[in-house]
Image (tube, grey):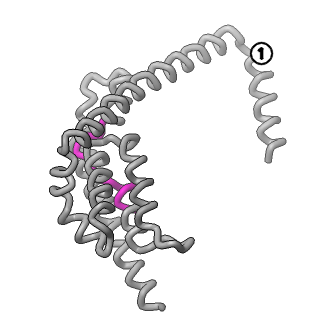
Amino acid sequence: MNILFVIICVVSIGMICLINPESAISVMLEGTRGAVDLSLKMTAIYALWMGILKIMEKSGLSYYVSKIFRPVTKLFFKNESKETQDIISMNLTANFLGMGGAATPLGILAMEKMQDGTERATDNMIMFFVINVTSIQLLPATIIAMRSTAGSHNPSDIILPALIATTVTTLIGIILVKLFTGVRKTRK
């Protein structure tokens, strides 16, 4: 497989040098500039949301936010400690606000807390993973930032379609997890 990639790279470089090297270089530089611009904007957005999460944590607001999601965490994550449910609630909040990058450390921590010592994922871990992947998003901050960087005239037009799509995928994911974990339990 590596030889295939070497051939592709050599042929591509050869084509660039032979056909139109001036335009290829300008396109590469333009692509690099776009990547750097996007990276800087995404870094700024993540820094903002991570700061907001830290302020929420230090001020105690995260406790109240976790109380809002407490019925959800109790429903889907039975037998988990209050601390684990609070971490899950903060993760759900971060995802709900479109802060996927900020939610990642909380998600990892929640998974570690739910681990039962075996190598297999528990039903709660599977449910958490699916809810995290599909996560209902009220404010898809990352997508809005990417649309803004791409020059969209109204980058926030994505909010309603994203809310509908993520709600539907989350509901389907929850139903499928319940079905498959139920089937797995009946086979045991």
Q: Residues within 10 Å of mark 1 (few under 14, many from 20)?
A: few
Q: Type of residue at label 1?
A: Cys
Q: Position of residue 47 (x, y in %)?
A: 36, 29
Q: Which residue is at 32% across, 55% downward?
A: 87
What residue is disc 1 on? Answer: 17
The picture quadrant where one finds residue 57 is top left
Q: Which residue is at 44% across, 73% downward?
A: 122
Q: How many marks?
A: 1
Q: Is residue 98 above or below residue 166?
A: above
Q: Position of residue 89 (x, y in %)?
A: 27, 56
Q: Which residue is at 37% across, 63% downward?
A: 128
Q: Which residues are magenta?
A: 130-141
Does residue 134 show up magenta in the picture? Answer: yes
Q: Which residue is at 77% across, 39% downward?
A: 5
> In the image, 3: left or right of 29?
right
Residue 165, visible in the rendered structure:
no
